Image: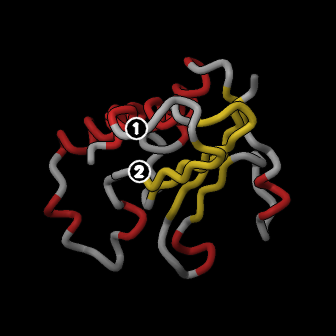
Amino acid sequence: MDARNILTETDEQYYDRILIDAPCSGMGVIRRKPELKWNKKPDDLISLPSVQYDILTEAAKTLKIGGRIVYSTCTVRPEENEQVVKAFLESHPSFVRDDSMKRRLTQDTESGSEWTILPHDYETDGFYMAAFERKG
């Protein structure tokens, strides 16, 4: 199913929690999947943030008041991460950053509501996650 059309399968304000593992460029896992360098076209990189934003926007409609969303990608590109989150929050005033995520993390982060893991941080892949809460 195309997550940009989730309301065809469920009701508005139906879920308490949502995890979005957004389709992304995969640039955070490129050391394990070097073929990504040849499989991605420049147009893919340009169009992905729009798809991610649309998925986040559609999923947000299905979240109950007081519910939480975690948005996650396996890329470290700001265009697919911080910029998508910023655009979403600017256009959806009923959503706020969920700073309680900071208490759940093992490392101090710049923002308590988002975290970028770089491959050299833990000798793992690169990932991004952000958390939001829907206010009334």
Q: CA distance from mark 1 to mark 2?
A: 8 Å
User: Relative to 9, is 26 above or below?
Assistant: below
Element under disc 2: loop
Q: Residue at x 55, y 81 (%)?
A: 123
The amino acid on which the numbered mark 1 sits, given as a three-letter code, is Ile
The residue wearing badge 1 is 55
The amino acid on which the numbered mark 2 sits, given as a three-letter code, is Ala
The residue wearing badge 2 is 22
Q: Nearer the viewer, residue 109 or 67?
A: 67
x and y percent of residue 106 in the render?
79, 70
x and y percent of residue 16 in the render?
65, 45
Say whether disc 1 or disc 2 marks the residue closer to the N-terminus.
2
Whether residue 82 sits left or right of residue 98 in the image: it is left
Q: Which corner quadrant of the image does residue 117 belong to? A: bottom right
Q: Residue at x 76, y 54 (%)?
A: 101
Q: Nearer the viewer, residue 73 or 42?
A: 73
User: Relative to 8, is 128 above or below?
Assistant: below
Whether residue 48 sits left or right of residue 130 in the image: it is left
